[in-house]
Structures are given as structure tokens and as C-alpha cells.
Image (cartoon, helix red, strand yellow):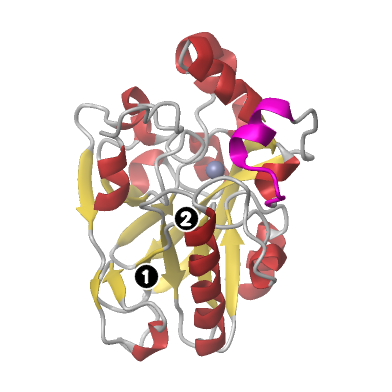
Amino acid sequence: MTTSAPISRVGMFSTGSVQVRPDHAAATWKPMMLWLLTSTKWTPPLPINFFVIEHREGLVLFDTGQDRASVTDPGSYFPAGITGAMYRRSAKAVVPADQTMAAGLGRLGYKSSDVSVVILSHLHQDHVGGLAELFHARIYVSQAEWDTLAQPRAELGGLMRRHIDLPGLAWTKVTPAPTTERALRPFTTAHDLFDDGSLVLIPTPGHTPGSLSLVVRRPGQPALALVGDLTFAAPLLESGHVPGAGDRKQLQQTTAMMNELRRNLGGLVVLATHDPDAEGELSKAFVR
Ligand SMILES: [Zn+2]
């Protein structure tokens, strides 16, 4: 790691809000298919956050929020038939015109064209919504996540290829490689984005098989972990309570590893995509 600080700012913005089933946000005894088909309740509106990091090598986005087209024209955005009905049962989103990714970047003082690197935690639609404005950027996703696009019934599992694999996007598919950096234990594989230790991708499977988290480190500041949908709220993660969608065993294992990493780093501010407290936690953790 270099001694000067390569990161000058971390910002975030929510592209509207989403309501999910309470059994989704925090697992109950019910298997996913049961709660998805029978739940009558919704959580309060939750954010759909994306993060912006000013690094001396360029402007980095972590996730891109939800596309406004998904709420203005849901009939053509989402699949038809039973698959579409499943999407409607699993989430209800609003994305106002002034809360798109481009609007959020503008609010933070940037333009979409300023972005040089995009990291996708995973490929669900509420994380890939800004891709159509990012043809000039390099898009990072895990190879493991990309491979799930080819699975049968991928669309039923939340992957809409036509909104992801847009012709002309510059993809880099990452397979985290063995790392000897002790500070990242218990994680033994990682991908150091700029080879300076400031932005390190780690595999955090569970919500999806190829989910990635980003560890953000600045000298003299608490480390941040942008964890995508590994949890819906940092206190839930700390207590080991996992969400109700995804591979439960893998979620439990990854959650335990993230908590161990937190102890190893002497504190770690966990910032999740749908955590209403993430914005407050970020402003406490980072003085820009
Ligand atoms: Zn999500």
C-alpha cells in the first residue's frame, strides 16, 4: 500500500426506494418459495443505494441503482407471464425522475461520463439499472456471477440478460485470486482494483453465487465494506441474521467471515444497498 491517500471522497445516492417482503429482509423459518407465494406484507420503503468513490485513477461506481424504465414501463421492462408475476410479488419500487443514477451523480457533482470504473455487486435489476449510460466505463463483475446468466431459469432467478449484456459494454470478469494479505483474513482470495490496497474486491457469495463486496481503505479512517445485498441492515449482519433469499448456508458462512474481517480490521463500516441507515453510517465514517 502507498502512504498517500488515493481516495479523496466516498459518496452515495439512492435511486428511489423499494419494498420487499419482511421474510426477504430477514430470514424466518419459511423457505423462499413459501413466503414469496403467500406473504401479504411489505417492509417500509428501503433505499436502492449506489456508491461513488473518487480515486486518483478515476471515478469508481459500486452498483448503478434501478432503472426508471422499470417503473414507467414495467410491462416491457419485466418478463411476462409467471416470471413477471414472481418479480411483482418480490418487490415494489418507485424511481422518481429526480432520483435516477444520472440525477444522483449530478447531485454529487458528477456526470455519468465522468465514471471510469463500475463494480457490480451482482446482476439483479436493482443494481444494473444505470448500465445503458456507462458504455465508456469498464464494468467489473465476478466471473462466477456472469456464469449464472447462462443457467436455465436465470430470468426466474432475477437475471434479465437484455438489461445486462448490452452490446458495447466493456466487461471485465473477475475471479478473485489468492492473497497473502493478512489484514483481509479470513478472506484468502481478493482482487485489488488498482494494486494499492485502497479498493479490494472480495467474494461474498450467498445472495447470489457470484456476489462481490468492496473493501474501501483510507489511511487513518475506518475501513468500509460495500456489501450489496449480503444484508439488509448492518446490525442484522453483526448479529449473524441473514436475509431470506439466496443460499442460506452460504449466506451464513459469508456473514461469519465478514464479521471476522471486521474484527481483524479493528472495525468495519458495513454499507448495504438496501440499508436505510447506510447513508448516516457513511457520513459518520467519512469526513470528506
Ligand atoms: Zn438488491
Q: In the image shown, does 60 or 197 lie closer to the viewer? A: 197
Q: Position of residue 27 (x, y in %)?
A: 68, 51
Q: Secondary structure at mark 1?
A: strand
Q: Is residue 39 left or right of residue 199?
A: right
Left or right of residue 283, residue 191 in this image: left
Residue drawn at x 65%, y 69% as measured from the top left: 240
Q: Residue at x 66, y 26 (%)?
A: 37
Residue 161 appears anywhere in the view: yes
Residue 189 position (above or below residue 99): below
Residue at screen point 55% across, 33% down? 100
Amino acid under disc 1: Leu
Q: Nearer the viewer, residue 235 or 99?
A: 235
Asked if the stretch drawn in magenta spans residue 282, the answer is: no
User: Which numbered disc covers residue 16?
Assistant: none
Closest to the camera, between mark 1 and mark 2, is: 2
The residue carrying mark 1 is 199
Q: Write down the region rendered in magenta.
A: 27-38
Q: In the rendered image, which quarter is residue 24 located in?
A: top right
Query: Residue 231: image x %, image y %?
Result: 60, 57
One can see residue 91 in this view: no
Task: Specify few, some or many for label 1: CA neighbours under 10 Å numbering under 14, 14-19, or 20 or more.
Answer: many
Q: Which residue is mark 2?
A: 206
Question: In 3D space, how far apart are the residues under numbered discs 1 and 2 (Cα atoms)?
Answer: 21 Å
The earlier-in-sequence mark between 1 and 2 is 1
Q: Position of residue 89 (x, y in %)?
A: 65, 24
